[in-house]
Image (tube, rainbow, N blue to C red):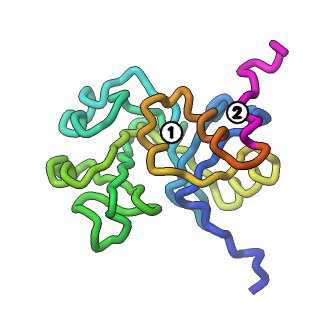
Amino acid sequence: MSGMTEVSSLTGRLLVATPALADPNFDRAVVLLLDHDEEGSLGVVLNRPTPVDVGDILEGWADLTGEPGVVFQGGPVSLDSALGVAVVPGGTTAEAAPPGWRPVHGAIGLVDLEAPPELLAPALGSLRIFAGYAGWGPGQLEDELVDGAWYVVESEPGDVSSPSPERLWREVLRRQRSELAMVATYPDDPSLN
């Protein structure tokens, strides 16, 4: 095996938009990768709350979502479909997983929004509902990483349910033990310097 075809999986990690990333869809985005392999990548943007209440589209799930109790825009793809991402403490294996939840990375997993919410309620640590997702074709994300569009950092279960999503970009960078912590101080509009 040459190693060229091998894609080391970044599933469960965060992609943090660098100040150099020009795409307005991902300006200061923090993306949780739910799937990453040679077929491509899929993730949700954790810090794009919308004005839409979860109860307006998925009534049964509204009581289980944390503050802010709104739908988040997970990315520019399939905006008419909803994804549930939940943290289930101790549910890190398929055997320990409650019905309607599939582990993705550690305690973070995907929720089957067709399942009855009460099945999952006792096990849930936190839940976020996303409209749409971010997707990359084979090799596309790797190219963006080479171009310096994203920082790749470890996720923490609390990132999924951050009560202050507008601060998540800075908070994630600030906790890095490297020069990335300095990037958190980058001004919102570089022309103001």
What span is in magenta? Answer: 180-193
Query: Mark 2 touching mark 1, by CB under 8 A?
Result: no
Q: Which residue is mark 1?
A: 46
Q: Earlier in the sequence, mark 2 or mark 1?
A: 1
Residue plotted at (51% across, 50% down): 156
Q: How many marks?
A: 2
SS for callout 2 = loop
Q: Position of residue 35 (x, y in %)?
A: 52, 59
* Identity, as a three-letter code, of the amino acid under mark 2: Ala
Q: Residue at x 47, y 28 (%)?
A: 164
Position of 48 relative to 104 (above/below): above
Residue 103 position by quadrant: bottom left
Q: Which residue ends up furthest to the top in the rendered image?
A: 192
Please state which amino acid type lies under the numbered disc 1.
Leu
Q: In the image, residue 134 lies at what x, y percent?
A: 55, 45
Q: Residue at x 32, y 53 (%)?
A: 111
Picture coordinates of residue 93, whole percent (x, y)? 36, 71
